[in-house]
Image (cartoon, helix red, strand yellow):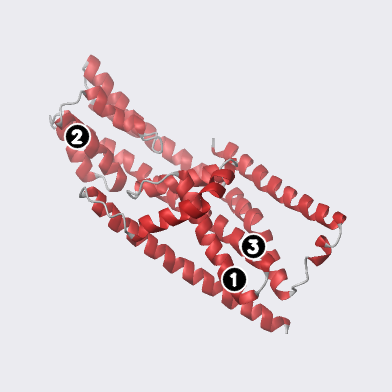
Amino acid sequence: MELRYFTLFVCAFCFLGISIFFALLVIIESCQKQKILWSMGETKDGSFTQLIFGVSNRVFGSLSSLILKLKFIESNACSVVTYLSLKGVIVEAKTAVSCLILFSFVSACLTFIFTVSLICSLCVAFCIFFALTAFFTNLLAKELSGLREQVPDAIRCSSTCVRCGLSLMQTFEQASHECKGALGQVFLLAHNRLNMGSSVSESLEVFESVREIPELKFIAVAFSVHHVTGGPIAEVLDCARESVLSELELARTIRIQTAQAKMSASIVTILPFVLLALFSFMSPGFLNPFFSSFVGISILVLALCMQLSGVMLVRKTLAKCEE
């Protein structure tokens, strides 16, 4: 009997995982199509992406505003918003959290249909919510890491263009062709500002505004000093490139040393809910003693508070290690 329940639970969980995976593929594909429409100056209010954003905001907007007051939820929401912005989709943190809650709610409903267990459904909803935030946070980390790895090549390209006698606008145009993704768009935006008649300082503000890639400030400072004082800039860019390479090497070392702490944070956050979902499914009355008396409810609340404190403590320690 227990083996059958366990097999049904694993099948239901795999079905949920596959469904959410394909749903994410549909969302990402729709976001890419919407990005193309926005780049062409067209909008399509009835698109699937806009429909998801609108429904999640109307249904779960108030709840998302409430849970955004928690710092770790806010930081994860900012990661989701930043990743979507790099992909050309501009959303607010409230909308992003509402979409995550919508996916979690749908997963909870499907789980309840399969298991007829409210506790199991709630635990699956929590797992899906935290798993999605961790998924987007990991995607953002990989995206930013790839962009930061391109900065030394961008500086080398700029130094080569300066040595060839190209102007600042031509240098930015060439760098926009050499760099891929969002980094190339940054150089293209700086080039377009110069082409539209903006001053050098206004065009260099583009590099300082990209907070996710602080290494770009080296380029802004180098060209700003060169514009004000003159003198050879190629050597300054070469020195900046060496500094960026050193920073990237240090960042790789820190990332390797904090990998275990990140894994611990993920396990501490998700594993208790996975175990509760598993035990509630295999033994439907597993949590009944906790709700039978005031002492049981107090113990359950204390356990949840300890779980939340452990998650916050691990994440706070991890944030200090990454500073």
In the picture shown, does residue 24 fall above or below 133? below
Q: Position of residue 144 (x, y in %)?
A: 40, 45
- The residues tagged by marks 3 and 2 sit, at their Cα atoms, a distance apart of 51 Å
Label 1: few (<14), some (14–19) or many (≥20) C-alpha neighbours in 10 Å: many
Q: Residues within 10 Å of mark 2 (few under 14, many from 20)?
A: many
C-alpha distance separating marks 2 and 1: 52 Å
Residue at mark 3: 122
Give the vertical position of 118 relative to 227 (above or below). below
Residue kind at label 3, given as amino acid type: Leu
Rendered-image quadrant of the N terminus: bottom right
Vertical placement of 281 versus 224: above or below?
below
Give amino acid for label 1. Thr
Q: Residue at x 58, y 44 (%)?
A: 66
Label 3 vs 2, first from the N-terminus: 3
Disc 2 secondary structure class: helix
Which is nearer the eye, 254 or 271? Answer: 271
Query: Which tag, 2 or 1, sits closer to the chain's start?
Result: 1
309 left or right, relative to 187: right
- Residue plotted at (47% across, 52% down): 58
Task: Give the label on residue 111, or none.
Answer: 1
Q: Name the mark on residue 191.
A: 2
- The residue most toward the top is 229
